Image: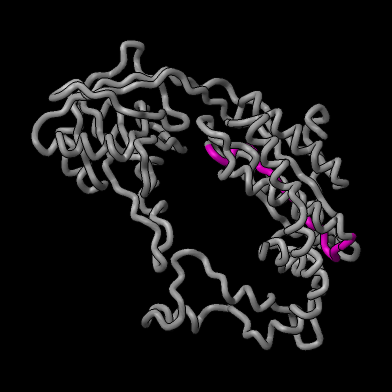
Amino acid sequence: MKRLLLVLVISCAPTAGPSGPHRAPEWISETKPYGTASAGSGPSGAAAAATASVPSPAAASAIAERYRGAVDKIVTAAHADREAYRKLSYLTDRIGNRLSGSAALGHAIAWAAQAMKEDGHDVHTETVMVPHWVRGVEAAEITAPISRSLHVLGLGGTIATPKAGITAPVVVVHDWAELDARRDAVKGAIVLYDVAMPKWSEDKGSGYGQTVEYRGRGASRAARHGAVAVLVRSVTAHSLRTPHTGAMNYEDGVEKIPALAVTVEDSTLIARLAAQGPVTVHLRADDQMLPDAESANVIGELRGRERPDEIVVISGHIDSWDVGQGAHDDGAGAVTMMQALTTIRKLGLQPRRTIRVVLFTNEENGLRGGRAYAKDQAVASRRAGSRSRPSPRSGTASRRASPTSPRCCA
């Protein structure tokens, strides 16, 4: 809710007030990114507080009060309206998982464009070519010293194993240094990255960033030492023996090897067994990478009344992984952005600046949508030249880009 109100304040605020640039409402001083220490939490917290560009309540009160009436209207309307939940229900229950290149993602893009048009927004789509990776049959089991099936999911973009699968000894490592130290043992083996994701903490935030690099770069790092495949402990701090897929990348010039995620429980089991003696695993994956497919970013706008070429962008991504409904990542985010724009429009609140919703395609396994949008805006900005200088609030001199494919345009 606070982010929706911030959009309103930024898009409606004049460039500067009598005493200089307007500042954010006082509630922004209560928010901080994960990992930012609070004042009073020690020397680092005091330093962060001293250097943070957070306005005092007194400095923020003028702009906060100026838009108090509009803010109250938005809060009341948003709490009473259930349309966002209905949209999310349709996206997740009727369309479901939406991996790039899939027919379901195409359906979701068309649905989102139509929904925003029906809400009265200026809508178009911009074509993006995206990866088209398709998951096949995937399986794994410990074959020695015990027989035990493993719960696995291929990482997005992984190559397939040979049809007969791969059977090899497992080398368990817990960081890059251990991988390099055991390079001789890794040759011809399956490498298991048994790297635990730290739980969320107030001072450090999520531990995701500390461990996701093993999923992203682990295959190529192991392949340099001659590994035949990798298993990656699922990047999660909590598990019910459910594997977590995610994006991975192959380095140019390094042999590609299969890469699969294994559950936290199965990863620790293999590690315990390996501490006692040799462990052998058989794995199979029939995944495949098809030629790039056509997709699109969806863009909806509420045009500004005074500074329409200054753009305030709010965004989410419309795609999801293929093994779930994508309700949290990022169905809820995409629908929230759609409904934020609709709420402001329904209330008749026309901002000074244009508010633009961008629903990016292919965030999960390629970032093609975001990169294409950034490239398009850079080109548009150069063409506009001095007629459209960067807005200090949007961070971009964004003009509406022309649709790149007539048949893809809503």
Is residue 105 at least partly visible in the picture? no
Q: Which residues are magenta?
A: 348-364
In this rendering, is residue 23 above or below 323? below
In this rendering, is residue 244 above or below 9? above
Q: Is residue 285 magenta?
A: no
The reply, left or right, for residue 209 in relation to residue 103 is left
In this view, the residue in front, 363 or 2, is 2
Query: What residue is at 57 percent from the left and 38 percent from the top?
Result: 326
Q: Quadrant for the N terminus, please.
A: bottom right
At which x and y percent is residue 11? 78, 65
In this view, the residue in front, 332 or 134, is 332
| Residue 370, quarter of the rendered image | top right
Farthest top residue in view: 164
Q: How is the image coloured?
A: one colour
At which x and y percent is residue 380? 77, 50
In this view, the residue in front, 177 or 69, is 69
At which x and y percent is residue 214? 35, 43
The reply, left or right, for residue 294 in relation to residue 110 is left
Q: Quadrant for the C terminus, please.
A: top right
Q: Is residue 349 magenta?
A: yes
In this rendering, is residue 8 above or below 108? below
Query: What residue is at 88 percent from the left and 46 percent from the top?
Result: 120
Query: What residue is at 72 percent from the left and 56 percent from the top?
Result: 313
